[in-house]
């Protein structure tokens, strides 16, 4: 798998137009134009970049990070459905880093359109933005786009393979291919003759696949639309799944690293004399901005690393949380970076009135994946091989190549299972460190594992953010709303790291979840103010939506209470005429939770909504006040995923997203003192535990068309639903997260 | 010193303060047991030592001469799944899967001690095992499911 293809800009535009409108495109030309990065091994037949036939079945290349969201199973099912495979014959492999597997949908996620008005599909077809051009060729997992991106391409890959297998059987049987059927990995003739695909592979692969393979009518689906056993499940319950941290090679050494406790700060020098004499230590390596110890086992590396005396430079940002928040607030004093919604005439609507005003704040957050950052690398014979649990293998390839001074085609990246990603592993810092170690120890494979403390203090954090809200509601509902958000820009930070420049223009991600919501408030304006605070920030599950849904949905709750309106009824009124899809999920969650009846004595409910990643999601949480604090009792989630490819997996993601959001809302906070990140480990950056779980009830709506995002949309409504429930329970309106600074939760 | 891991004796030469976790992973090469926090806070490294549920990241090897250790690899393999692993599969519990070895080791201990655990029993036994994907509701369901199967119910 070393022959890596490049892809032309034109080729991708053709493909993106096809993804966009469901327009058939030249599949044959698509796979012939860029090189197929797959080279068949012994006993393998490669039909196209997604389909490898082997003696024991079909291996589907599922080129998206499996970080828990079940994506490899769903992507494999897209191919398996069209090929009429039996599920027991299907395997999934991530495959090589290649522009062939570029994620075309993720590039559009930053475009400043209002999703419920202009569908993501349409935007893709229009796709004309500089940043998109630069991101082309990036193989990445993020933005809840994997299924959206694969929806046409991978079904067509399966259908094209099936077509040539049928043709080969037709030639052999001297029959019209139209008369032949396929089932369970075999072509079946009208007389019952069965020819397994394996017996046809050699002939079939010689046949040119159709330019426009016919896709199955969804009514004929046997696999898609139904719960499938995940392909990774058996490995993950037997300890046999290989995560990055589990990669083992002959002669491998084990390393760990320490960088400035003020992330992004410089390393001025170190004294490692003591470390070098410790048992098992093989090398101490200067990585420029960090020091690494390489040893015969990870523990020896950890222990020796602690003895290294390092002189660190100052933090490149204000030294305390208070100073950082003041710097973020100062962005309000500058002209906005964006005004992506400006409906009606806000000034006129507010003139002479006494609007409700409130300021909301959220803290920096860590991703805290269960598997700490790690990567393995081996440099030998002028070739660098990297094993990394990562969300962007082509970026990893290019950055590691640059770090060791090799051309990209001399770097191979193996993407292992990820022990959680949540956006953290869209970065490349850990892999570049491993590549540098491989260069320093050329010929010896090295596995770099960060201590949890290094992971917690060197994240690319969800930025802190501040919102200033003003609104006016009458007995008929809100008539005016202004929302100004100030935060460091995730988009600019990531673009600078990956592309070397920040794209000009409005930062949509800063205000997503606020400017793009289906509320027909006649006068509303949303502005985004970019702060340049240099704390490293990155994508955190649901990105801008993670804070903006908290701001908007809590403030709408405030407006509803101020005007004496029911929060659900008020939202339904605002959604009328804007989006029936949105209204349907709100109606569903109200019905599921019995919203129209009062909660049981001693309990209270809160509701919130967010349209993110193409998917409207509504959540209601019911809580109680117990002797040890507030308990989460029940939670209802309704979500419209367009088309539900695997309902059981979608249900898992709805609940997963909500729990991730609840953990952050209740207790998540990264703070700074003397420039350093204060939180170190799970004892001071914890998450929800089994004993704190509410009982979940979910409903998937499928309004039709194509699948929309699933991995992230469950997260944004969780925090505001809970904060609104706390108001309903206690009368306390909490406008600053985490909530445990204001109330006590039961353990 | 000697360790008996999943029934197999191993002669170990390592610094006595090396935690069992790293001996399992980096010396013996059993990578099913995971590193999560190093301070007994997350449960990803849970194993059984002489029948007791332990966090292997915080157990110096020097105290374990002759100990019998069971890891996830000793509970069942893909070809010989235990009842509890089968319950995990049937309930499609795992997402990223990184914490699941530790979750299963804690659940095995729970079911050995309490044949029909209540939700409160599950809360008490499992709250030391962190899961960032939020698989808790399915873990709970799988434990109840495994308990029924082990009782032949």
Image: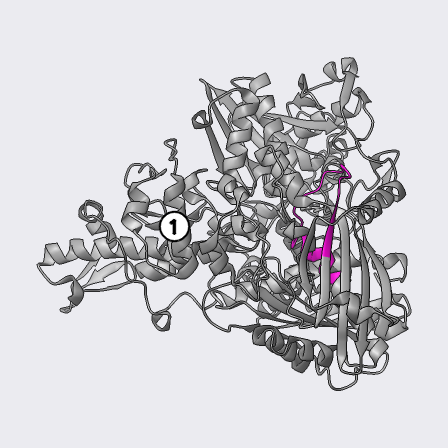
Label 1: how many Cα within 10 Å (few below 14, some 14–19, many 20+) = many
Residue A396 in the image, given as x and y percentages of width and height: 54, 34
Residue B38 in the image, given as x and y percentages of width and height: 74, 39
Seen in the image, is A308 located left or right of residue A375?
right
| Quadrant in the picture for residue B33 | top right
Seen in the image, is A242 located left or right of residue A667?
left
Closer-to-camera residue (A119/A153): A119
Closer-to-camera residue (A52/B139): A52
Q: Is residue A543 magenta?
A: yes
Q: Residue furthest bottom?
A: A597
| Quadrant in the picture for residue A655 | bottom right
Seen in the image, is B139 located left or right of residue A204?
right
Residue A460 in the image, given as x and y percentages of width and height: 70, 40
Q: Is residue B44 magenta?
A: no
Closer-to-camera residue (A130/A734): A130
Q: Which residues are magenta?
A: A527-550
Q: Quadrant of the C terminus of chain A?
A: bottom right
Q: Which residue is mark 1?
A: A15
Q: Secondary structure at mark 1?
A: helix
Closer-to-camera residue (A306/A440): A440
- For disc 1, the chain is A
Q: Residue furthest left?
A: A174
């Amino acid at each position: 798998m070393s022959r890596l293809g490049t892809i032309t800009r034109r080729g991708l535009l053709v493909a993106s137009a096809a993804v966009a409108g469901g327009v058939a495109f030249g599949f044959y030309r698509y796979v012939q134009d860029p090189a197929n990065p797959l080279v068949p091994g012994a006993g393998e037949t490669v039909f196209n970049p997604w389909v490898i036939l082997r003696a024991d079945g079909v291996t589907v290349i599922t080129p998206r990070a499996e970080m828990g969201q079940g994506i490899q199973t769903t992507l494999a099912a897209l191919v398996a459905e069209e090929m009429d495979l039996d599920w027991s014959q299907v395997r999934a492999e991530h495959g090589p880093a290649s522009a062939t597997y570029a994620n075309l949908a993720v590039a559009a996620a930053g475009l400043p359109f209002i999703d419920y008005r202009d569908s993501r599909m349409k935007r893709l077809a229009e796709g004309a933005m500089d940043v998109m051009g630069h991101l082309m060729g990036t193989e990445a997992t993020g933005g809840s786009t994997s299924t959206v991106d694969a929806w046409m391409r991978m079904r067509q890959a399966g259908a094209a393979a099936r077509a040539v297998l049928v043709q080969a059987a037709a030639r052999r049987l001297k029959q019209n291919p139209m008369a032949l059927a396929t089932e369970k990995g075999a072509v079946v003739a009208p007389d019952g003759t069965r020819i397994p695909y394996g017996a046809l592979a050699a002939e079939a692969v010689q046949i040119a696949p159709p330019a426009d393979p016919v896709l199955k009518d969804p009514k004929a689906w046997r696999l898609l639309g139904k719960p499938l056993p995940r392909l990774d499940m058996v490995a993950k319950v037997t300890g046999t799944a290989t995560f990055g941290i589990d990669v083992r090679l002959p002669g491998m050494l084990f390393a760990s690293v320490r960088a400035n406790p003020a992330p992004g700060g410089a390393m001025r020098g170190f004294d490692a004399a003591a470390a070098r004499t410790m048992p098992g230590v093989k090398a101490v390596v200067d990585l420029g901005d960090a020091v690494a110890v390489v040893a015969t086992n990870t523990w020896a590396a950890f222990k020796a690393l602690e003895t290294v005396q390092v002189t660190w430079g100052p933090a490149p940002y204000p030294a305390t949380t208070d100073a950082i928040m003041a710097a973020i607030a100062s962005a309000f004093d500058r002209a906005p970076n964006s005004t992506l919604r400006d409906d009606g005439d806000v000034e006129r609507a507010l003139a002479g009135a006494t609007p409700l005003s409130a300021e909301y704040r959220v803290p920096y957050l860590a991703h805290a994946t269960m598997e700490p950052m790690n990567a393995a690398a081996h440099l030998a014979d002028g070739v660098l091989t990297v094993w990394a649990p990562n969300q962007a293998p082509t970026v990893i390839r290019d950055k590691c190549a640059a770090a060791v001074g090799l051309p990209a085609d001399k770097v191979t990246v193996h993407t292992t299972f990820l022990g959680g990603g949540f956006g953290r592993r869209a970065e490349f810092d850990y892999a570049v460190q491993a590549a540098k170690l491989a260069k320093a120890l050329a010929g010896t494979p090295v596995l770099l594992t960060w201590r949890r403390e290094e992971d917690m203090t060197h994240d690319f954090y969800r930025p802190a953010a501040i919102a200033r809200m003003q609104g006016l509601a009458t007995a008929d509902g809100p008539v005016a709303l202004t929302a100004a958000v100030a935060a460091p820009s995730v988009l600019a930070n990531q673009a600078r790291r990956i592309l070397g420049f920040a794209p000009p223009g409005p930062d949509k991600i800063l205000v997503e979840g606020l400017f793009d919501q289906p509320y027909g408030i006649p006068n509303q304006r949303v502005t985004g103010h970019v702060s340049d605070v240099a704390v490293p920030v990155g994508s955190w599950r649901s990105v801008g939506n993670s804070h903006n849904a908290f701001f908007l949905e809590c403030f709408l709750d405030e407006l509803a209470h101020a005007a004496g309106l029911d929060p659900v009824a008020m939202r339904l009124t605002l959604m009328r005429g804007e989006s029936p899809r949105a209204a349907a999920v709100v109606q569903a969650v109200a019905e599921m939770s019995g919203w129209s009846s009062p909660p049981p004595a001693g309990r209270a409910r809160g509701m919130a909504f967010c349209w993110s990643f193409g998917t409207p999601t509504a959540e209601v949480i019911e809580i109680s006040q117990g002797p040890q604090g507030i308990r989460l009792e029940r939670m209802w989630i309704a979500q419209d995923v367009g088309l539900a490819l695997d309902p059981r997996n979608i249900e898992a993601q709805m609940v997963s997203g909500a729990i991730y959001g609840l953990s952050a809302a209740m207790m998540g906070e990264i703070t700074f003192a003397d420039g350093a990140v204060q939180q170190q480990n799970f004892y001071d950056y914890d998450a929800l535990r089994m004993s704190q779980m509410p009982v979940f009830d979910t409903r998937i709506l499928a309004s039709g068309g194509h699948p929309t995002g699933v991995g992230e949309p469950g997260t944004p409504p969780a925090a505001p639903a809970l904060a609104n429930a706390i108001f309903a329970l206690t009368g306390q309106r909490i406008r600053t997260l985490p909530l445990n600074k204001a109330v006590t939760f039961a353990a | 010193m000697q360790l008996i891991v999943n029934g197999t004796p191993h002669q170990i030469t390592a610094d006595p303060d090396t935690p069992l976790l790293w001996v399992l992973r980096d010396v013996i090469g059993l990578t099913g047991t995971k590193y999560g926090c190093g301070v007994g806070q997350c449960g990803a490294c849970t194993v059984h030592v002489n029948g007791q549920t332990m966090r292997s990241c915080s157990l110096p090897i020097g105290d374990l001469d002759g100990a019998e250790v069971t890891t996830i690899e000793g509970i069942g393999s893909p070809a010989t799944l235990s009842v509890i692993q089968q319950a995990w599969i049937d309930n499609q519990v795992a997402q990223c899967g990184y914490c699941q070895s530790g979750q299963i080791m804690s659940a095995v201990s729970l079911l050995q001690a309490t044949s029909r655990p209540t939700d409160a029993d599950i809360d008490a036994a499992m709250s030391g095992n962190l899961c960032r994907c939020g698989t808790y509701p399915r873990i709970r369901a799988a434990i109840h499911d495994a308990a029924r199967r082990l009782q032949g119910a």
